[in-house]
Image (cartoon, grey):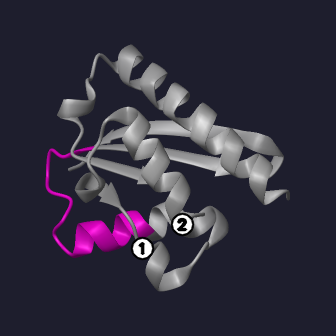
């Protein structure tokens, strides 16, 4: 996988598809409690959050602990955030995965 192509793809497309999903759900960024992205690269997470207008404090990040755990990164980070009490009942979490084959997926969750 070409790292530059993935970075370019993720920082361009992921904010767009997240915005589309929020629009379809009738939710604004201000109503989102947490952004949870595939834990591939901190720079990607920072750029996506910035393009959405979301402060980094609302981005769930465990990349510094485990590195890129591939398909397990979102469930691992969500589990940690829930167990630590960071994610609360009724919290809105916007998730996006991206990667191999330059594909992506988005889910909006209301916890509990």
Residue 24: quadrant of the picture: top left
**Are discs 2 and 1 less than 8 Å apart at CB?**
yes
Q: At numbered mark 1, what does the secondary structure look like: helix, strand or loop?
A: loop
The residue singled out by tag 1 in the image is: 62
Q: Which residue lies furthest to the bottom in this view?
A: 65
Q: In this view, does 22 lie above or below 26?
A: below
Residue 38: quadrant of the picture: bottom right
Q: Which image quadrant: the N terminus?
A: bottom right
Location of residue 47 in the rendering, given as x and y in whole percent from the top left corner: 48, 47
Q: In this view, does 86 lie above or below 54?
A: below
Q: Label 2, label 1: how many angstroms apart (C-alpha)?
A: 8 Å
Q: Is residue 44 visible?
A: yes
**Nearest to N terminus: mark 2 or mark 1:** 1
**Image point (25%, 53%), residue name:** 58
**Image point (73%, 50%), residue name:** 6
Identify the magenta region: 77-92
On the picture, is 32 further left or further right than 20? left
Question: Dot 1 surroundings within 10 Å: few (below 14), some, or many (20 or more)?
Answer: some
Question: Dot 2 surroundings within 10 Å: few (below 14), some, or many (20 or more)?
Answer: many
Residue 87: quadrant of the picture: bottom left
On the picture, is 49 further left or further right than 81? right
Count of numbered badges drawn on the protein:
2
The residue singled out by tag 2 in the image is: 73
**Image point (27%, 31%), residue name:** 29
On the picture, is 73 further left or further right than 36? right
Location of residue 61 in the rendering, given as x and y in whole percent from the top left corner: 39, 66
Q: In this view, does 16 lie above or below 80?
A: above
């Amino acid at each position: 996988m070409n790292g530059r192509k993935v970075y370019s793809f993720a920082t361009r497309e992921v904010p767009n598809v997240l915005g589309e999903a929020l629009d379809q759900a009738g939710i604004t960024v201000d109503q989102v409690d947490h952004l949870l992205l595939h834990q591939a690269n901190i720079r990607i997470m920072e750029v996506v959050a910035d393009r959405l207008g979301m402060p980094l404090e609302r981005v769930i990040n465990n990349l510094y602990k485990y590195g890129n755990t591939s398909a397990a990164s979102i469930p691992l980070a969500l589990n940690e955030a829930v167990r630590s009490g960071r994610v609360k009942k009724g919290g809105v979490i916007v998730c996006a995965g991206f990667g191999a084959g330059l594909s992506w997926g988005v889910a909006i969750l209301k916890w509990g």
